[in-house]
Amino acid sequence: MPVKRRPRARTAGGRRILVVHGPNLNLIGTREPAVYGGETLSSIERRLRKLAVELHVGLESFQSNSEGALVDRIQRARDTVDGILINPGAYTHTSIALRDALLAVDLPTVEVHLSNVHRREEFRHRSLIAPVAAGQILGFGGDSYLLGLRALVGEIERRTAAR
Ligand code: DQA
């Protein structure tokens, strides 16, 4: 039997997006600056919030170094947000649990990365998340998140119009 969804909570007239940051992303700004640049997570968050106002969407964000906490947060998003913007960090390459959580909540999802993982070690070339995401944006530092937010909002609008 199909499972009924509760209507999602919305901001006044806007959609809600959950931004998820995986392990070690709390350290960007000081962590391997040659790879990830000098921008901190709070600066990226500030820029995202500014863009969210422009796009008329509400943002909530969550960072954790723990796979289970990330799975719990994604599960809780099921009936409360309209889409997920996620940088799964190293779990991109390893986590079937994160991928299954995204499949379970069945929300439009965009995967982002600061670095261009395809120019790095081979073990970073495979993403377990990409096949369950609408798309991926990578290699543009903090701008990957901003481009990802724009892409996600467009994807949500397209899916809503197609219903
Ligand atoms: C990353 C790329 C991952 O391979 C790495 O483990 C990270 C950051 C990025 O944003 O470039 O932690 O997701």
Image (spheres, rainbow, N blue to C red):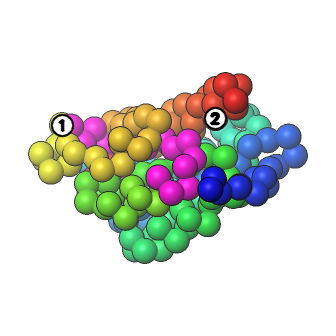
- Evaluate whether residue 146 shows in this view: no
Which structural element holds mark 2? helix
Amino acid under disc 2 = Ile
**Crowd rating for badge 2 (residues with CA inside 10 Å; few <14, some 14–19, many 20+):** some
**Which residue is the site of mark 1?**
119
How far, Cα to Cα, is label 1 from label 2? 30 Å
In front: label 1 or label 2: 2
Residues in magenta, as a range: 103-118
Image: 7 above or below 153: below
Which is nearer the eye, 20 or 30?
20
**Residue count near mark 1 (Cα–Cα under 10 Å), binned few <14, some 14–19, many ≥20:** few
Can see residue 12?
Answer: yes
Looking at the image, do the residues carrying marks 1 and 2 touch, with CB atoms under 8 Å apart? no
Estimate the x, y position of residue 125 in percent, counting from the top left.
Answer: 20, 43
Left or right: residue 106 versus residue 59 is: left
Residue lying at the far right of the rendered structure: 12
Q: Residue at x 35, y 41 (%)?
A: 131
User: Which of the 4 image quarters holds residue 112?
Assistant: top left
Decide which of 91, 116 is in the foreground and name it. 91
Q: Which residue lies at the image location 57% right of the left edge and 47% below the top edge? A: 107
Q: On the image, numbered disc 2 is attached to which residue?
A: 156
The residue lying toward the viewer, choosing from 16 and 6, is 6
Secondary structure category for the residue under label 1: helix
Taking the image as shown, residue 45 lies to the left or right of residue 131, namely right
Q: Earlier in the sequence, mark 1 or mark 2?
A: 1
- The three-letter amino acid code for the residue at tag 1 is Arg
Residue 26 falls in which quadrant of the image? bottom left
x and y percentages locating residue 89 in the rendered image: 34, 56
Q: Nearer the viewer, residue 94 or 115?
A: 94
Identify the residue shown where x is 36% and y is 48%: 129
